[in-house]
Amino acid sequence: MPNVEYRGMNLIVPENDSEWREYLKMAREHRLVMRKCSACGLLRYPPGRGCPWCSTLGWSWQEVSDKGTIHSYEIVAQAIQPGFRDWAPYPVVVVELDEQRGRPTQDEGLRMVGNLVTPDFRPEGEENVAIGQRVRVLFQDLSPEIALPQFTLTGEPPEGRLWRLA
Amino acid sequence: MGLLKDRYCIVGVGETEYSRNSGRSTRAMAVEAIRKAMDDGGLSPKDVDGMLSYHQNDSTPSLIVGPDLGTRLNFWVDMIGGGSSIEALVGIAMGAIEVGMCRTVAIFRSMNGYSELRIGGTGARGAAPVRGQDLATRPYGMSSPGQAFAPSFMRHMCDYGTTSEQVAHVKVAHSKHASQNPKAFYKERVTVGDVLNSRWIVKPLHLLDCCVETDNATCLIVTSAERARDLRPRPISIMGVAGRVSKPRSDFAFAHGPLSRVAGYYAKDIVFPMAGIGPEDVNLTGSYDAFTFTTMLQLEEYGFCKKGEGGAYVSSGIIELGGKRPNNTSGGQLCEGYTHGMNLVIENVRQLRGTADDYCPGWAEGKHSYDYSPGKCRQVKDVEIAMNLGWSRPETGSALILRR
Ligand SMILES: [Zn+2]
């Protein structure tokens, strides 16, 4: 799999990247997949080698729904990576997917980091970023072989009260 | 391990100046800091036969630094790491001496942290190739420590109503302390308004919520209590240590909550029982201040206040000189200089000796005015027990309890 240039960074996903290669390939097919433990059945992200909860090495890919809720966020005002300077201020969100919420303990869930973007992949305005907002995955194609999962607002009613930094 | 309580000591401390243009190598700075620590402890080159350092590919190895000091090493390790390394290395030094690999260990950190390799990964490092686990964060413009930690800070504000004003008091307190520290890079006192009006870096962090990157080298020396008895300064005893204690899912900290829970939640159950004390027995803290929020989260997690009440705690005056339990009396990394934690331990050693190097003319003899107005004294009265809370990331931290 060739390297992909994105915002001035080289994303390197070699053939021997046994954790990320298939995950990003399936993202390019616009499928969000998680590793599912063959013993305890729990899903995990990022795609790690063993099960963090029962240590079993057996796993299979499982497609998950593309919906979730913003669990926390930040607004980057001063970009560090040169390729993000023209994007600032931009939101980075921690999203909790609808699958496996509160499992295996009440403080856990399938959480991912991404940008909150508009449907044309510009950073969402800060006034629309809040904890509790409902989002869905939007796949940003970077090459014929790789896509980055991003998040966009669904317009659904928020989960619980919305909270944002005043 | 409880058997080693009070059997090891910190016997020497030293540092270079904190600047933004050292104009010299990390080798030259390391040698100055270690030499000063050796002189401070009354140690000759043949006394020091162990060396430990930590680095982020920005330092000079022990094998190069050792001979510059006339030492021949029986043990050395140069460990990759930043914050939380120093407490871990103190424990490793104790272990190395205990098993007989060496007798006395100098631990150093040397970094041109402003003029050469800046912490946040600016410039070429900002555009470095991304592979492996970094694919989960860096493609989304999340790379610097502030960017990696901000969701934990934000979630604390959401869950507990913590405000920017409350947290700004950490910078206010540390800046007051720095005004009594001739070594501090920033000696000017600031107000809550100054913090809130400084520009945003990554919300919820303003510029003044972030530490001050500097060029510096720092050193402390560990030896056994037996050998320490023959040395000049009052040896400072190590009561307890915890190194790089981590939360579950340290591969991706966002996976395991609560997000605002930090590693001290686990480290406290190691370090306090080892020392045989609780947080109420601690007179002075050095809670790692890479950011104002890191100080608050750790004080809370180690039990100096209840979970969720960190905002009230840090804005109450308790953490200021003259308060019940001052924090980072040197001005810390928010004001004195960013060292990846070493200066916070050095300060606590000097405080426990009663010889904080403030503006009191007799500080070296332990004569202090205890007048905490600007440009005066920063010695804490009757300090018996001091504690360092070392931060690497929300999911990893270290701790060290010292007594005089
Ligand atoms: Zn499992």
Image (spheres, coloured by chain):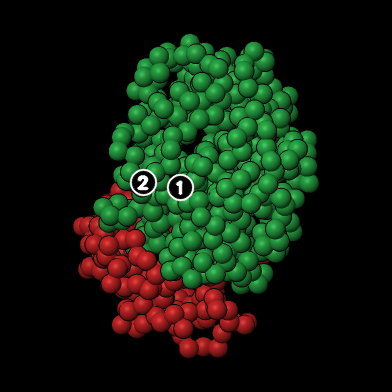
Front in this rendered view, residue A82 or A120: A82
- Say which amino acid is labelled 2: Arg
Q: Residue at the spot x=43%, y=38% of the render?
A: B17
Residue B47 appears in the rendering: yes
Mark 1 vs 2: CB contact within 8 A: yes
Colour representing chain B: green
Q: Residue at the spot x=67%, y=19% of the render?
A: B225
Residue B5 position, x and y percent, is 72, 27
Q: Could you classify mark 2 by the number of other residues whose Cα lies within 10 Å: few (under 14), some (14-19), or many (20 or more)?
A: some
Q: Residue at the spot x=67%, y=31% of the render?
A: B366
Q: Does dot 1 land on a helix, a strand or a loop?
A: loop
Query: Among all residues in the image, which is located at the extreme top?
Result: B46
- The residue that label 1 is drawn on is B185
Residue B206, numbered label: none
Pointer 2 indicates a residue of which chain?
B
- The residue that label 2 is drawn on is B20
Colour representing chain A: red
Q: Residue at the spot x=30%, y=67% of the render?
A: A84
